[in-house]
Amino acid sequence: MDHLTFGRRCGLRVSAYALGTVNFGTRWGGGADREEARAVLDRFAEAGGTFLDTADCYHDGEAEALIGGFLQGRRDRFTLATKYAYGAGTADRNVLTTGNSRRTMVRALEASLRRLQTDHVDLYWVHFPDTLTPVDEVVAALDDLVRAGKIRYGGLSNFPAGRVARAVTLGELSARTPVVGVQTEYSLIDRTAEREVLPMAEAMGIGAALWGPLGGGLLTGKYRQGAEGRLTAWQGRMMRTESDGHRSAVLDELLAVAKEAGEPPARVAIAWLNIRARHAATAHVPVIGPRTVAQLDDYLGALGLELDEDHMRRLDTVSAVTLGSPHDVANSARAVLLGGDATLFRPPTPSVP
């Protein structure tokens, strides 16, 4: 598996996939038990994967505890990321244990380190914005943890582009450890990150971790056939459904392309994402979340799958989202802004094919 630096603001090396561990554990129902979770992690490592992504809330802390046991004796072979903000579980979740504050951050990290059986994490994500804690406080607290040796880098997950850009800029101006990455949902059925988050990441030079590459299983096509999975076992938690015509059209086209390519729909959906990631101006890393080794092998098979131009064009077209204001207006004015002839200047290299 290829490796890359996680953006232009740091030297953190990550594998082309991050192994998301939202399926590690059984406290939510429908996840992977200890034996299966270990097999998935070991297979990921055998394939050259080194980037692990978890969170304190996954299966109410069980995912972190499992990973902590699995990494004994080989901790330094992995880039380990975890998250805080949501609380480690319902029994631990209250007004003093959630949110983005320095108090919550420090408390949550100490608990995560105990479960992970390590003295540091390589990348610490703020899982969700609480809309109350000032970005200044978040940036300063992450920097304090870096200086204390508890984390190596900080990042923001599910934050709007403006708040991420402010955090990056504050780090620059105050000589604090920079925020190096953003984590956002991105897949064939949800490309809304193209409006602001991904252009911001490319402009600021930070890495982008892309979660939900299969739309919670929707892009496998299995739910059209009545198969069970997260849709029933997790009561719809983190699941995307055919809730509108756009999603149905995307799935229709994906199934058609997969049939023509002779590949499973899930593998085609991930291959589409991998191809776009390779053409991005900064590191784009899909966060995959297999529950079984067989599912992981589908993800790994997509690493070497190339889609032809027609298939890429069809998937790009059917999944495209309207950028809206101000992008549409700015695009319509571009020819005038370039002196009346859009060919006068060489346009920027596109971030995707």
Image (tube, rainbow, N blue to C red):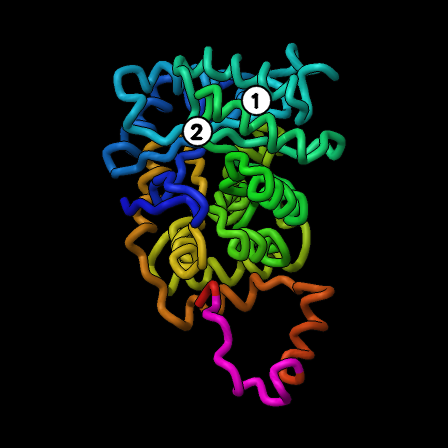
- Which residue is depicted at the point 54% across and 57% down? 203
Badge 2 amino acid: Arg
Residue designated by label 2: 152
Horizontal side of 201 relative to 51 (left or right) equals: right
Count all numbered tags in the image, as a single digit. 2
- Which residue is depicted at the point 63% across and 25% down? 85
Q: Is residue 47 above or below residue 245?
A: above
- Which residue is depicted at the point 67% across and 43% down? 163
Q: Which residues are magenta?
A: 337-350
Horizontal side of 330 relative to 341 (left or right) equals: right
Q: Is residue 116 above or below residue 215?
A: above
Measured from the top left, where is residue 179 in percent x and y? Answer: 53, 39
Would you say the magenta stretch is mainly helix, strand or loop? loop
Residue 226 can be seen, yes or no: no
Quadrant that contains the C terminus = bottom left
In the depicted view, which residue is nearer to us: 66 or 37? 66
Residue designated by label 1: 57
Residue 340 can be seen, yes or no: yes
Q: Residue furthest bottom?
A: 340
